[in-house]
Amino acid sequence: MWSEYASQLLDGTWVTVRVGVLSVILACVLGLIGAACKLSTVPPLRWMATLYTTVIRGVPDLVWMLLLFFGGQILFNNFVESHNLPHIDFNQFVVGILTLGFIYGAYFTESFRGAFMAVQKGQLEAGAAYGMTPMQVFRRVMFPQMVRYALPSISNNWLVLLKSTAVISMTGLAELLYVADTAGRSAGKPMQFLLAASFIYLGLTAISSAGFRYLERRYSLGVRAGEL
């Protein structure tokens, strides 16, 4: 039985990993932009970033997935029909990445904002005093330290995002949960396949946690134990 469905589970796992990685990249980009807006001296930018993080974090991921995929498809269809344009179906893979990236961009915004604020201003001023340009100060002084402060939060957000890829199964994308559920129903043993999927998720999170522990040690070189 397992040999018959093993390749399907592996394919579903690969889809899950790709969705997770691409989503977290988008979330990091949005998070950096959002953090910059929240720390900006321009009030409208701060207000928009605050509205973004407040609204997104206040609504469940599943609701956003349903709204953006099914609701967005309906709105798009109404638009193209009213303008006599060709009908286009949304791609579940692309919409899943955009939705998860958009959602978790709000969480990364707060992570990066706190990390930027944790970097001592005196070090930035020292970099400028040495003749560094603002970009050099950011790249050589602020960014490496910001990453060190943000890594625990980034790790947590990634693990949550990775498990949240399961909500994309609602769109029919053949990711891990969808494949496990479909295979379990076909084989008449849904519990066994769902348990298999849970162990695969556990393995992915264990590997991710080990990777983030390595990064935390790497970015903590030269930092005394207990120092923030």
Image (cartoon, grey):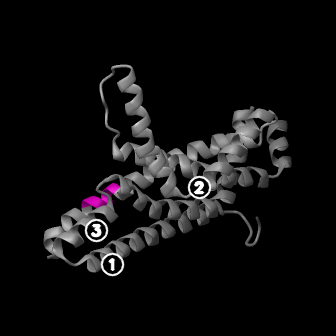
Q: Is there any visible trace of residue 211 in the rendered image?
A: yes
Q: Which residue is mark 3?
A: 181
So how many labels did they put on this image? 3
Amino acid type of the residue that numbered disc 1 sits on in the rendered structure: Leu
Quadrant in which the C terminus appears: bottom right
Q: Residue at x 65, y 63 (%)?
A: 221
Residue 2's place in the image compared with 168, above or below, is: below
Tell me the residue that label 2 is attached to.
59
**Residue at 77% over, 67% down:** 227
Please tell me how crowded label 3 is: few (under 14), some (14-19), or many (20+) other residues with Cα within 10 Å.
some
Q: Earlier in the sequence, mark 3 or mark 2?
A: 2
Displayed quadrant of residue 32: top right
Residue 47 shown left or right of residue 161 in the figure: right
- Mark 1 neighbour class, 10 Å CA radius: few under 14, some 14 to 19, many 20 or more: few
Of 212 and 95, the residue lying toward us: 95
Per the rendered image, the range of residues in magenta is 11-15
Q: Residue at x 37, y 74 (%)?
A: 198
Report the residue marked by disc 1.
195
How far apart, in angstroms, are the residues tagged by discs 3 and 2?
Answer: 26 Å
Question: Residue 144 has which mark?
Answer: none
Does residue 197 belong to the magenta stretch? Answer: no
Residue nearest the observer in this picture, 17 or 70: 70
Q: Amino acid at mark 2?
A: Val
Q: Residues within 10 Å of mark 2 (few under 14, many from 20)?
A: few
Local secondary structure at mark 3: helix
Please provide percent x and percent y for residue 66: 45, 51
